[in-house]
Image (cartoon, rainbow, N blue to C red):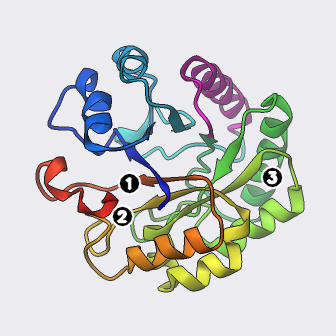
Amino acid sequence: MPRFAANLTLLFTERPVAGRAMAARDAGFEGVEVLFPYALPDWPRALGKAGLPVVLINTPAPDWGTGGRGVAAIPGQEARFRAEFAQALEMAHHLQAARIHIMAGLAHGPKAHDTFLENLAWAAGQAGGQPLTIEPINPHDIPGYFLNDFDQAAGILDSLNAPGLALQFDAYHAHRITGDVMGTWARHGARAAHVQVAGQPGRHEPDEGEIDTPAFFARLDAEGYDGWVSGEYTPKARTEDGLGWIA
């Protein structure tokens, strides 16, 4: 089976930040990811205490509460993107995070496309070996998000061909965008360096609903995928009560 990581922004929220990583370790997870480890100083200490590797963080979105979803594809926000990417790079080094997910933001059109490519190329050049990802996000959950299609992401990755820049494949988003997780993986899985899972409908436990998660895991194994698979979902109840999917 894949190596499983817990998204601590969404899982184990019954506990304070200081206890989530330890709870994930005790539940059998081998790694963790945190969406935005910037505002709470407890994150580095808590993650270090548990001894689990940090497999992913996002670039900052300090305006998330008012609708911000990153700025990498927003024309005119290049200076902000560079400052926030530098912040992400510093945090990734501090946490020894395996990857940084670069959030595109709410934008559309040719200028946004050009801005995204330019910012990604710049970030790849600045990363110094730090692996980076981009993730298609479905337009139902985040209307207006620039990167909302897997073919679009593949075209961007192929045109840049930047070392260390790869696809972040979220099976939940794949299902909502295409309705066909397996077919989408068949087309684009070779570009993927990080995988996330959740169930649909509701974005709850991955083993419930329309997505055949066990079959997807078997496909990953059969193809020799050796990256992380992170549970990025909202538990229906207490986190520990819905962890049968990692067994």
* Up-down relation of residue 108 to residue 43 (above or below): below
| Amino acid type for the residue under numbered disc 3 | Leu
Q: Which mark is residue 231?
A: 1
6 in relation to 224, above or below: above
Is the C-beta separation of discs 3 and 2 under 8 Å?
no
| Above/below status of 24 relative to 216 | above
Residue at position x 85%, y 64% from top? 158
Callouts 1 and 2 close, C-beta under 8 Å: yes
Residue marked by disc 2: 198
Query: In the rendered image, is residue 139 in sight?
Result: no
Where are the magenta residues, as a range? 77-99
- Badge 1 crowding class, 10 Å Cα cut-off, few under 14, some 14 to 19, many 20 or more, is many
Label drawn at residue 117: 3
Task: Using a 10 Å C-alpha cutoff, classify the residue at mark 2 as few (fewer than 14 neighbours), some (14 to 19) or many (20 or more).
Answer: many
Residue at horizontal 45 percent and vertical 33 percent from the top: 36
Give the x, y percent position of residue 143. 45, 65
The reply to whether the magenta stretch includes residue 91 is yes
Mark 3 Cα-neighbour bin, 10 Å: few <14, some 14–19, many ≥20: some
Q: Nearer the viewer, mark 3 or mark 2?
A: 2
- Callout 3: SS: helix
Say which element carries label 2: loop
Residue 116 picture location, percent across and down? 74, 51
Sequence-wise, which precedes: disc 3 or disc 2? 3
